[in-house]
């Protein structure tokens, strides 16, 4: 018992000593991830037909001069995780209604896959938001406001993703 307490205290002290290094590395990783997301969503928006936008790190300037900071408004792993949990619950519910009972390992694998695909869906969401904001700024963004516009696009894309997951689960589950 005494040895276990000493080991736990030593691990806690090591963790506290490593916390600044872990924190700095986390923010460096997050910054590079934000730039990757910004670049991928910028490319997608241009592929969809937006033109005249410029990319500077994580700040995208729309053709009308409006600046969109991807780092603060779009990358949210909590949202991606909640959408992944919702998609996993929908898949599990559809499978249960079709007569399957997924194991805990199967549910964890589905959760991991829906999180990974949800990350890609987040890039699509950002790209579609940028495309719509660039091409239809006066009719969509100015009339509704940026936050309402952003949240509406996110709700639509994520709902479409969850519905697609439900469709796949229904289509591939044998009765």
Image (cartoon, rainbow, N blue to C red):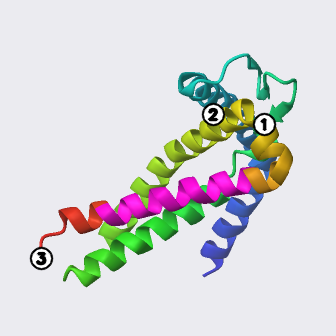
Residue 161 magenta? yes
- The answer to which image quadrant residue 93 occupies is bottom left
**For marks 2 and 1 on the same chain, the one whose residue lies earlier in the sequence:** 2
The residue under label 1 is 137
Q: Nearer the viewer, mark 2 or mark 3?
A: 3
Q: Residue furthest left?
A: 175
Q: Could you tell me residue 161's position as x and y percent?
A: 46, 56
Q: Residues within 10 Å of mark 2 (few under 14, many from 20)?
A: many
Give the total of numbered labels. Answer: 3
Residue 166 magenta? yes
Give the distance between the C-alpha atoms of the residues marked 2 and 1, in whole angstroms.
Answer: 22 Å
* Residue 88 visible in the current orientation: yes
- Residue at (59% x, 44% y) in the render: 125
- Residue at (42% x, 68% y) in the render: 88
User: Secondary structure beneath disc 1?
Assistant: helix
Region rendered in magenta: 150-167
**For marks 2 and 3 on the same chain, the one whose residue lies earlier in the sequence:** 2
Which mark is drawn over residue 175?
3
Q: Could you tell me residue 53's position as x and y percent?
A: 74, 20
Camera-side residue: 3 or 141?
141
Q: Horizontally, is 105 left or right of 140 in the view?
A: left
User: Secondary structure beneath disc 2?
Assistant: helix
Classify the position of the C terminus by image quarter. bottom left
């Amino acid at each position: 018992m005494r040895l276990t307490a000493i080991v736990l205290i030593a691990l806690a002290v090591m963790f506290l000593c490593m916390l600044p290094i872990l924190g700095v590395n986390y923010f460096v990783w997050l910054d590079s991830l934000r730039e990757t997301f910004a670049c991928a969503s910028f490319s997608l928006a241009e592929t969809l037909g937006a033109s005249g936008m410029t990319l500077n790190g994580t700040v995208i300037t729309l053709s009308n001069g409006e600046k969109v900071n991807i780092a603060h408004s779009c990358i949210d792993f909590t949202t991606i995780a909640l959408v992944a949990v919702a998609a996993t619950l929908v898949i599990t519910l559809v499978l249960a209604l079709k007569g399957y009972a997924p194991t805990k390992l199967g549910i964890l694998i589905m959760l991991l896959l829906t999180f990974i695909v949800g990350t890609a869906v987040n890039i699509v969401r950002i790209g579609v938001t940028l495309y719509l904001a660039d091409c239809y700024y006066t009719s969509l963004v100015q009339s509704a406001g940026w936050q309402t516009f952003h949240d509406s696009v996110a709700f639509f894309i994520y709902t479409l993703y969850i519905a697609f997951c439900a469709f796949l689960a229904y289509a591939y589950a044998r009765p």
